[in-house]
Image (cartoon, rainbow, N blue to C red):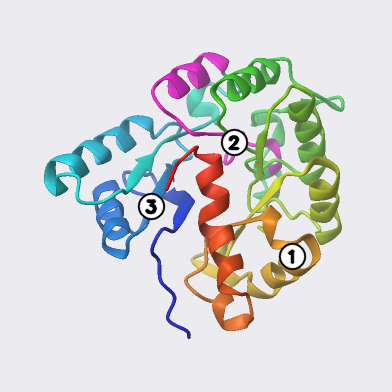
Amino acid sequence: MAKVSMKGVIDMHVHSNPDIRIRAYDDFELMEAGIRVGARAIVIKTHQGITVDRAYLCNRHNAIVHGGDNDFQMFGSITLNRQMGGINPAAVESGLKLGGKVVWLPTASACNHLKKMGKNPDAGVACVRDGKIVPELKDVFQLVKDFDVVLGTGHVSPEECFVVVEAARAAGVKKIVVTHPEWWIVDMSLEDQLKMVRDYDVLLERCYAQNMGGGKYKSNLPSNLEVIQTVGYKNVMISTDGGYMADHGIPEDQLRYMTHDIQMGLLNLTE
């Protein structure tokens, strides 16, 4: 494997402890790892709701312990699962006023997620009913627009995703990221990913591996390479890679764009 510098990398989708499912790092360990490799920023995510307060504490810890000798920043997010009351504009508003940078639609509570896991989808948090977004989403979209943050599509189905994205664009939402469309829970076809980019100019968030359940993971490398070739690297945001794409012909300038430049714009950061 080629040696790839992590300098300036930004990962906008990292799960850390504390969490119901044990993760590789806790927040402080993740922050320290990011600082060690020269990362610019990380957005921490939880299926349990909100990470904005955790990000604040990490940044205070960084300032106290490291005294401003790095430019690393941790950012928080809001995930609209049942723990947050589902599609809850009040929770979104609070989270964004506290500095949240990403609002994810339901993940583990999405009707599609429950259906794929063999559970009752009617117990989930609906984003779409009768082919239209639920009324509460209009207020969420307005907040996302007003605070100029990112809307992540979570674990909704491809069919729901098209409805949601069209409505979000009509509401003036500028920053839309389709959350790991390759994951078997979401399972968006290459044709639909291309259509999504072509019709709505969204970003596709792609990860190196996907959780198949039972502790098993599947490499997305062939699919990722195909998507970059088909869609174009400027609409592909890499959340996790580890250098594999550099070993398969992706030029360094394109790698930087997918792991740094896109994210800088989404988070309104400057060099």
| Nearer mark to the viewer, of 1 and 3 | 3
Q: Which circle's residue, 3 or 2, is located before the other in the chain?
A: 3
Q: Which residue is mark 1?
A: 227
> Could you give the CA–CA distance between mark 1 and mark 3, rounded to whole angstroms?
26 Å
Helix or strand or loop: what does disc 1 sit on? helix
Q: Position of residue 71 (x, y in %)?
A: 30, 48
Q: Are marks 1 and 3 in contact (CB under 8 Å)?
A: no
Q: Which residue is mark 3?
A: 40
In the image, what residue type sits under mark 1?
Val
Q: Position of residue 104 (x, y in %)?
A: 57, 35
Crowding near pointer 3: few (<14 within 10 Å), some, many (20+)? many
Magenta segment boundaries in residue numbering: 89-112
Helix or strand or loop: what does disc 2 sit on? loop
147 relative position to 97: left or right = right
Front position in the image: 147 or 161? 147
Residue at image point 47% right, 53% down: 11
